Amino acid sequence: MSTALELVQRYFDYSNQSDMTRIATLLSESSTYYSVNLGFFTGKTAIIAMQTAFHDQYQTLKWTIEHITEIKPDVVKVVFSFDGTLQDGSQQQRQGHEYILVYAAQIQHISVDR
């Protein structure tokens, strides 16, 4: 497994644990994040703040990697399913795609579709 694929797998593992400290170790100060639902975020601090607020909305949450592939060196496409229970007890389920770019053994950019 390539370094990029291993890094992305760790990112999903840490996300499923809501472990912001460990997620932060995968990002650089110049990392960027884009989601069609949440918009743009620049830098480790902003990305972790956004992810913390997102995770805090849920009692439980889990991303399942349905398919992962390195579409070119250091560019990883992930097809995922998401299941979560919001604080009010309502359920959310959705599928989507993420593209994650890796540079110098850190996540440089995350783009989430859906």
Image: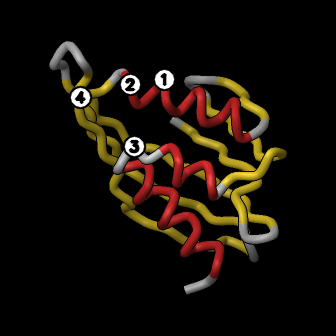
- Cα separation, mark 4 vs mark 1, equals 13 Å
Crowd rating for badge 3 (residues with CA inside 10 Å; few <14, some 14–19, many 20+): some
Q: Residue furthest top?
A: 88
Q: Is label 3 in a helix, a strand or a loop?
A: loop
Q: Is label 1 in a helix, a strand or a loop?
A: helix
Question: Can you identify the residue that label 3 sits on?
Answer: 18
Q: Amino acid at mark 1?
A: Ala
Q: Amino acid at mark 2?
A: Asp
- Cα separation, mark 4 vs mark 3, equals 11 Å
Q: Amino acid at mark 3?
A: Ser
Question: Can you identify the residue that label 1 sits on?
Answer: 53
Question: Can you identify the residue that label 4 sits on?
Answer: 59
Q: Amino acid at mark 4?
A: Gln
Question: Can you identify the residue that label 2 sits on?
Answer: 56
Which circle's residue, 1 or 3, is located before the other in the chain?
3
Q: Residue at x 63, y 58 (%)?
A: 26
Crowd rating for badge 2 (residues with CA inside 10 Å; few <14, some 14–19, many 20+): few
Q: Is label 4 in a helix, a strand or a loop?
A: strand
